[in-house]
Image (cartoon, rainbow, N blue to C red):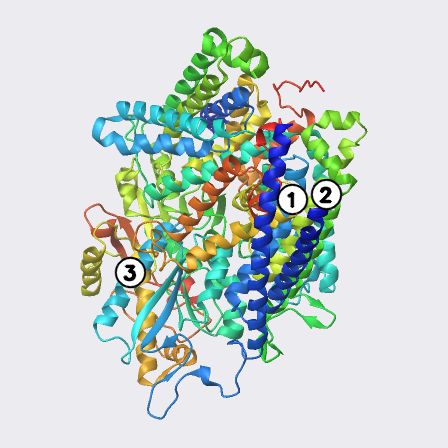
Amino acid sequence: MSTFAELFLNGLSMGSVYALIALGFVVIFRATEVVNFAHASLLLAGGYVTASLHDDIGFWPALLVGIAGAAVVGAAVEFLVMRRYRGSDHSVLAIVTIGVDILLTTELTRRIGTDVLTLGDPWGDSVLTVGPISLAHTRIAAFVAAALLITVFLLAFRYTSWGVAMRAAAESPETAALMGVRLGRVSLGAWAVAGALAAVAALFLTVFPTPGLERATSLAALKAFPAAILGGLDSTTGALVGGLLVGVTESLATGYQSELTFLGRGLGDLAPYLVMTVILLIRPAGLFGTKELARV
Amino acid sequence: MSEALAGPLRFATRTRTYVWAAGALLLLALPFYLDRFWLQAGLFAMAAAIGAIGINLLTGSTGQLSMGHAFFLAVGAYGYCVFAADGGDAGDGLTGLGLPTWLAAVLAVLVAGLAGGVFSPIAGRLRGAYLGIATLALIFIGQHVLFNARDLTGGFNGRDVPPLSLFGLTFDDRELLVANVPFGSAEKLWYAGLVLLLGCGLFARGVLRGRPGRAMNAIRDHRIAAGVIGVPVARYRAAVFVLSSMYAGLAGVLLALVFQRTVPDYFGITLSLEYLAMIVIGGLGSVSGAVIGAVFVSVLPQLLTRYSDALPLVSAPGTGGIAPGEASRYLYGAAVVAVVLFLPGGLVRVAAGRRFRTDPGEKR
Amino acid sequence: MSTTNETNETNETNETSTRNATSGTVRVAAGALAALLLLAGCSSKAKDDDGNDKGGTAAGEVKTGEGISGKTITLGALTDMTGVYATLGKSVTQAQQLYVKQLNADGGVCGYKVALSVRDHGYDPQKAVSGYTELAPKVLGFVQFIGSPFVAAVEKRIDGQDKALVLPQAWSSALLGSSYIRVIGSTYDIETINAVDFLMKEKGLKKGDKLGHVYFEGDYGESALLGSKHIAKEAGLTVVEQKIKPTDNDMTAQVAALKKAGVKAVVISAGPRQAASLVGVAAAGGFDVPIIGNNSAFAPQLLATQAGPALLKNYYVASPSLPIGADTPGAQKLVADYKKAYPKDSLDNGVVAGWTAASAFGEALKKACETKDLTREGVDKALLTIDALDTGFGTPQNFTDPKAASSKQSVILRPDKTVTGGMKVVQEADASDTATQYTPGA
């Protein structure tokens, strides 16, 4: 039982980090209807900036610069690439983000090289032990930070004029534009927010239990894809639920590997995708996604 | 106007025939001159071209984003091994049915199609981004099976690929002297690859130029409108998915024959992304675009690696600086972005002398 | 309407230019074709009956073949500097480049200079195979080939036609058995047997206990698993398996599972990062069992991370040779030279592995020179006569039996901040009884 609780809590905490990434993903999709495969590189960019600055300016300022840096990279991608595309095919734009991702990831991994960079976080390897269950402080911090950020984000989405503009743009770009919403700004904002969220996620993906930032860190974004999809690509609640579901599934599938040998070993990576496939079979638009309404 | 154009037009057609004939002859003559490295690079490009034609039918012409193409390549490659290998006593102890190799190749392609068909209940219900990410699941499932189903796949070390034999000719490394030039597997497979690529290209062109092609484009441009005007949308989408999987399966078989061994690491997500890059760079929705893109993406890294010593900026491994592998990734990442932004329609439009240039803004 | 007109016009102009272009192309193509036809039959690939391509064999001279042109012997290195094994590949390659430089400074072999042709495949099968295809006709042999699946992919060609000596930097037992592919040092299964033997002798692991094994999917982890399963059967242990992927960096779930299973010791056959995470999580959670890793499961950079203190406390590494910071003259010279050549790069076991492989090839070349036969065949034969190559790292390498690894010994190390390379010896080179009796693949 204690093992289960430990796995479950760890899964929840990882899941909240995935939710942060998935949320950025959903924000971009809502604002621009583009699937952003370059998300992995935004994450890496944020982590890299934080990692390379923390020695000189301390952890918290470095983190802030890292978040800002990733936001700038996100905005730059929107401004320099996405905005220049004149066609209307969103799957072409999705492929463009793959190109952007290849460029950014190659540059960042080349800089990181073979190093493992630490982020200089204040939590270290301390652990909270309650009875038989132990949970790393970083994991608790991840959960709290993610919960906080997601709440702030949802409130902003609902009550600020930026949030309203964004929802209007998602609802109907033409109408929103006619009502005076500047679509360019909305999508620029969406990319920046997504970058910032990814940078925070990068922090929690590279602190203890993981040794630090290295070239493969960005692959964690691959787990945010099923999270975003199974919740529903256009639903912020969905990103949250999807993230948690993926985190818990992954943790349990890994922890109970010995009991699941009939499925082959090393299920951790696969499990989120299996859950996603099953959910999509039942609900093609994800758990909270809106079914498509179309006019001819 | 038509009078004036008739002459030059006929002339143009004639020259085009000459160019084609010269090109074909050149391709046929290459194995006599190029060494194995170049032939192998060409074969990788041919296999990639077949796969790219397939995914272009699906993503380029029908508008269904697939990131799972590598999975179907794996089905083709491993399917061929399972059907063709001698089971049991052959030494590696892996499952094999020992069928004639040509039959194994055909069956492997069919199985890849079948795999596409099995996935089509999901493919049929999902669109756009949802489909793209759902097909990503195929990659993870594929990798998991390739590493774990030891008896079938040989696990991490992969399994040997039995050489193809057709009409008494075996495509292996036993030397065969043709006009005093020793023919190994690469030289022999070169011709098989050419024939397959030509067949695949012509078939896809037939599909695209006929009724099905127009229906597919209608589905891409407006799914519901297509349904309203009488296109059986669901059936078409499922059929294209199956067809595209079969192309991938064939590409997988050819790749396996060139590699002479299938390795699970190959069939990962990078491969799927490469295929998407190919069709975007070459030109969405066209057969020649797929071929051009495939050549670009698969030959570029090999060229850069080979000439890494001589290129400026690119540095030899071990000396720091930009490694050839990285350089090629920069180039093709940039190519994807640049082509979409500045050359809508891909390289194929450039090759065609921009004759069909349309204002991309009109396409809304 | 004006737009249509404009388009028409551009079409026409374009057509003219295309026409000119195509007729130009035709002429060029036709010329090329004519040239081709003229040359047909005298292609450079065509076989001459004189057999000149086998090189000079004049009396008293050294016999040479592929890979030697002019006064240069070319050796190939297929490495990974941009993929998952980048850390290993970089160290191995630089060490080998250093060896070649020194060899040439000492006069080379038989008056020939040695050159290294390096190709980075980034752990991509297609690039690896095409790199092999490119280099195979040009080199005498390969001092480095990273990635056992790729070596396996070209094994048939190595054994069948090329017959060139290949020294893979992959210690998978699946590669043993070929006369041309020679694994240097103990393979991962033997190393793991020695590691578990150490746990039983020194760390209180005993019959009936459970042993956790966290391993990578793929050649490295799964070869190691063969070893732990073998010794578990011999010694009455139960192996609790945890398979991970190279992309998994957080070992929390694995530690939870191992804890639940009640293992008394853990073997980790994964990368340095996974080892750091595993040791760190175990220490933080009060899960106090000895952990031992294979030679690839440590990098000196790790001591600077959060997991550093835990690694220093409770982590061991089984290695096929003494660490780079060893107290032998050979090791100290290598450290000094390497530092001088690559001041910015860290010294790790990859340097030792690369150096040892290059030395083995170099020795084989020198022996082949003595018998005046620098062909591929000559070098293969020469290597078979080397039975105790010592490069200053404690474990003599015996190459006389192509079916066995060149050594069955392992050195047990533990992390230490104060030593170069971050490792010190706790148990000198030794082969356990189980390892000595073990035949790979059986």
Q: Is C58 above or below relative to C108?
A: below
> Are there few (<14), some (14-19), or many (20+) residues within 10 Å of tag 1?
many
Q: Position of residue A237 (x, y in %)?
A: 54, 17
Q: Is B320 above or below relative to A138?
A: below
Q: Position of residue C144 (x, y in %)?
A: 38, 63
Name the one closer to the observer, A16 or C102. Answer: C102
Protein chain holding label 1: B
Q: Position of residue B17 (x, y in %)?
A: 68, 58
Disc 3 residue type (three-letter): Ala
Dot 2 and dot 1 residues touching (CB under 8 Å): yes
Disc 1 residue type (three-letter): Ser
Q: Residue at x 60, y 75 (%)?
A: B174
Q: Which mark is residue C350?
A: none
> What's the distance in space between the residues labelled 2 and 1, CA to CA?
8 Å
Q: Is A76 above or below relative to C316?
A: above
Q: Residue at x 36, y 49 (%)?
A: C297
Disc 2 residue type (three-letter): Leu
In which image quadrant can residue C72 be found? bottom left
Q: Is residue B232 left or right of residue A49?
A: right
Secondary element type, mark 3: helix
> Are there few (<14), some (14-19), or many (20+) residues within 10 Å of tag 3?
many
Instruction: Give the residue pinned by disc 1.
Output: B286
Q: Is residue C130 left or right of residue B171?
A: left
> What's the distance in space between the residues labelled 2 and 3, CA to CA?
55 Å
Name the one closer to the observer, B299 or C396. Answer: B299
Q: Position of residue C288 (x, y in %)?
A: 35, 38
Q: Are marks 3 and 1 on the same chain?
A: no
Protein chain holding label 2: B
Q: Which mark is residue B208?
A: 2
Q: In this view of the protein, can residue C25 be seen by the observer? A: yes
